[in-house]
Structures are given as C-alpha cells and as structure tokens.
Amino acid sequence: MTTLVNTRPPDRGWRLFLRTIVARAYPRVVGQQREKAWIFFETFLPFLATVGYIYVYRAMQAPEDYIGFVVMGGAMTAFWLNVMWSMASQLYWEKESGNLALYVMAPNSLMAILLGMALGGMFATTLRAVIITVLGSLLFGIQFQVSSYLQLLVVFVLTMTALYGLGMLLASLFLLWGREAWQISVALQEPIYFLSGFYFPIRSFGFAIAMSASIVPLTLGMDAMRQLVFATGPALGFLPVQVEVAVLLVLAVGFVAAARFWLSYMERRAIEEGTLTDRRR
Amino acid sequence: MSDPQAIRVENLGRVYKIRAVKKGEARERVALTDVNLDVPRGELFGLLGPNGAGKTTLIKILTTLLAPTTGRALVAGYDVARQAPEVRPRINMVSGGESSGYGLLTVRENLWMFGQFYGLDTQTTHARIDALLEIVGLADRAHTKTSDLSTGLRQKMNIVRGFLTDPEVVFLDEPTLGLDVGASRDIRRFVRQWMAERAGRTVLLTTHYMAEADELCDRVAIINAGRVLACDTPANLKRRLQREALFKLETSPLVNGALTTFQTLPGVRKVLHAPHDGFSALDLSLEADSALSGVIGALTAHNASIISLQKREPTLEDVFVDVVGMSMTEAEKHGD
C-alpha cells in the first residue's frame, strides 16, 4: 500500500473547485454515450409533441414561421426537462443514493457539484436539442433567417446560464426536502410549458402575464432567439432583443448569486436539522 | 496537528425533532446523551450497539454531516461543527449497504470521480485505484459498470473509495452489513492491513456484529439508547466477566415456568433463553461452577433432558448482556 503516498499534495481552492466541476459533469456526459436509449426517448417523445403542434398550426393555416417557433420550443423543452429533473430534484436523488452525504463530507464545494451537474446536463441536452431542431427543420422545411449570429450566441449563453442558475437555485431550495421536491417538479412542468410560450409567441398573453412569465429565463430567451432567427420574429416578439438580453443578464447573475446564497444557508440548516442524509424526520 | 487524539468527544448530545403523526405525540427523539470518548491516533476503535443505539448519529456528527445539540466533538484536532472545512480533507467514510456513485460509470471512473472531489491529481488517483483494487481483489473489475457489480463487490468498491484519499481518520459505519462471509472477511483483512501499514491512521468502526468488533478493534465502546455504557479493550471487557462461570446448555423444549425457576436459583446471575425447533438453547451466567448443580436439578424437576452442556469463555456478547441487561437482539426489539 506504499503507492498511496502522494505524488503531489491534493489541490485546494479554485483548482479543487474546477476539478469538482469536471468530475461531476463527467457522469452526465459519459452517461449520454452509455445509455443510447435515453437519447431516443428524450428526443423522440418531445419531438412527437412538437409535431402535434405543427399539424395543428398547419390545419389552422397559421403563418409558416409558427412552425419554426414550435420546433424551437420543442428543442428548448429538452433544456427545461433537464433543469427540472436533473438539476432541481437531483439532490433528492443524490440523497436517496447516498451521494449527497459524500459530496457534503468531501472538502469540495457543493456549488461546484451543482455547476458540474449543470454543465454536464447542458452538454448532454444540447445534443438532444440539436437533433430536434435538425429533424424538425428537415421534415417541415423550416426557413431560418438569422439576423445576427453573435447576438444569437449571446442570447443562448445567457438563457442557459440563467436557466441552469434557476435549476441550481431550485436544487438549493429543495435540499431540505425529500419527495416533496420531486412532486414540485412534477407540478411545475406543464405550467411552465404553457407560460413560457414553448409552442406559441409569448406576446399572445399580453404584457402583464408575459412579463410575469419572464421570471423563467426560457420565456425571454426563446422570444429573443425567435426574433433573431425568423423573418417574422421581430414582429411577433414581446420586447426588443436588447431589452431581453439585459433582463436575461440580470436573471443569470441573480439566479446564480441566489443559488450560492441559498445553497450555503440550506446546507447549514440541513446539517442542523439532520435532513442531509435522512429522507424524512 | 499536535493533538494526540484523533477523535475527542465531550458531553455530546443530539436530539432530533420529529414530525408528529398524531397530535400530542412526542416531537423529539433523543439519539445521543452526554457521550464522552477519546480515540488516540493509530487506534482501531469500535462502537458496538444495536440498531438505533446512536452509532450512526455519532458518526454523522463526527463526519460534519450533522450538528450536535449539546457538547462538542473534535476530529484530527478540529471542531466538527465550527471547523468543518478543516476536518473534511482529513476524513472519509464508508457505510454498509451504500449505493454511492453512478451505475453507468465503471468502478475506475466512479473512484476517479470521488478522488477528484478531494483534489487528487489524476495520476495519483489512478495509481491509488490500481493499488487498492488489487488489495481488495477487484482489479479485474476496474472496467465493469458499477450497476453490474454484486452487493459484495460494490461494497469493496466503496471501501476503496473511502481509503483512496488516504484519510487520517476513516469512519466505517457497519461496513460488512448484509455481506457474505467471504466478502466480510476480505474487508476486515483489508482494514487490518491498512492500519498496519499506515501508522498514525485511525479507524472508527461501528458494528452490531460482536465477533467483528472482537476481531478488529483495539478498544470498544458499548453504546445503547444513545449512551456509552462501557469502553475498554475487548480483552479487558471480557475479563470483567471472568469471575463468572458461563455455560451453554441445550435441552429439550422448555416451558416459561422453568425459566422463571432458573432465574431464582441461588448462584444464577443471568439466563438467556433461545427457543429453537425441537430444543431450547440456554446461556447461563453463574456465580460459580457449583451453581450448575441447582440448574440441572431444576431441569430434572421440569422433566427436561440435557442435549449438550459446554463451559465457555466470555465473549463481547456476554459483556453486552452484562452491561445493557439484555441481548443485542432484545435491545433492538426494545429500541423499536
């Protein structure tokens, strides 16, 4: 057992933070390759729902860009599902499997664990989103007219940062809970589909409801992306893209900062109350 | 650290608040009361007690996963409640029946991942994984998906995970729970070897297997209902009982009245009865050998025949009965 001697001292500080992010992202990235059935179910099933909406719009003879709106909504659905099931309620599953105790007990930061989960999830989900977009575009002949690739990239990155920041915040808030967290995820899934305008322009709701729904980053993110990639996008958009970018920036910073604060607070409370390892008291 | 104690526990207590099912029900459960322990560096220390005795609660506090309600605990010289970031790099834990890691990852990948959480560089991590997998006999499964491992092999992987970081203090919480004889033996052998080769490293082991504690531990604390009732080396604990004469007796099936009679006989200290299919097993604790004649007389009076009679040396089970007043099985039922 003499080989246990260190070749160099263990990393601490930001090096440990980065190591933890990479290590926790790894199972998600690799898991994607190992369980190819997941790709089928998590791509094919959302795609079926998307196709359903497309045929409804076709039957209604809606403007052709609506088909593109729906395909984009279908692609972004994958991210929302990932945030709800693999971020928000993930610590519940980690608690059930015994991983959470090991994460807390290790010298790393739980924030790095959450970031790793987010990055790994984002990577794996992007693949599904791309498949839905490409399939939908090819099957239904969607015409893209990108006005600015740079702005599109900025909007996408900000949307993902804010969305996964929200996921991290929810994961932190759910840390004290057991199965309730899972049930809240179930309860949130469909209303968010509806309110975020996955399958129609958010502008249809009117200003007050659309503004309220903008607390979910996908709402403004999708709206801005639709404005940037479809010819009729700007006419159907809710707010100017620049304003939506600014709001997304605020949401991204706000959610990540809030996640950091609540994670620290909830970890402390969970240790005091004994709920870190026990499913229910 | 200059502290010679790897673990120092002072007047430690923990009370859980429980959600009441019915109105008026107790909303608190005392898990630990006024626990005091010192475990010097380099010791393999055992916590012996039935399920629900408070062993796991104590481990959770020592591993910074649970805050104590009263008192304090120091691990490697640092306060677990106030200095958790100092404690965590120095410890690790393995629990019995744990299913940590991810089933889609191989054994090596899971171990690498946990090594990263402790800041180990990849080269060191893989070198240690190779060495430890070899020792526990899991080297040929390094590239097997964790979900394909049997319970015993999975627990060996968990053991490797716990020791991979070369911790100053390792907490083993019922590490052989539910394992077959072979896997349990391998794990005990590994722990002994690690202790022998890593001077100054400390292991705190909780178990409700008496033989495991007896075989492995330098010292043992007997814990029941949240209190430490005795703490000494297994030999010293057993020596307490050597003034007693212990017999194992198998007879034809006994009725309850016979047991009551035995317990009132002169010279009889304790009688534990375990009914089996077709016979009764009695563990007798007598003040002296001479008291045995009274027991045999009483058996004859109750028309019971003796199948076998054996004088034996005290075990930790006897110590537990002596200290707690009931067997481990009875204590678990009592705790429920």
Image (cartoon, helix red, strand yellow):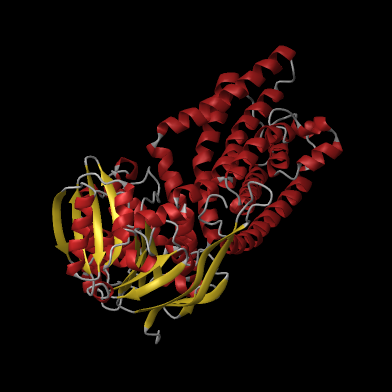
Residue B218: x and y, percent? 27, 74
Residue B230: x and y, percent? 37, 73
Outermost residue, bottom side: B2
Query: Can I make out residue B138 in this image?
Result: no
Residue A237: x and y, percent? 78, 35
On screen, residue A97 versus residue B184, left or right, reads: right
Which residue is painted at 63% across and 51% down in the image? B19
Foreground of the two, A258 or B223: B223
Image quadrant in which the N terminus of chain A is located: bottom left
> Which image quarter: residue A152?
top right
On screen, residue B130 versus residue B74, left or right, reads: left
Residue B118: x and y, percent? 41, 65
Above or below, B293 against A86 in this view is below
On screen, residue A101 versus residue B313, left or right, reads: right
Query: Can I make out residue B159 in this image?
Result: yes
Which residue is painted at 62% across and 62% down in the image? A269
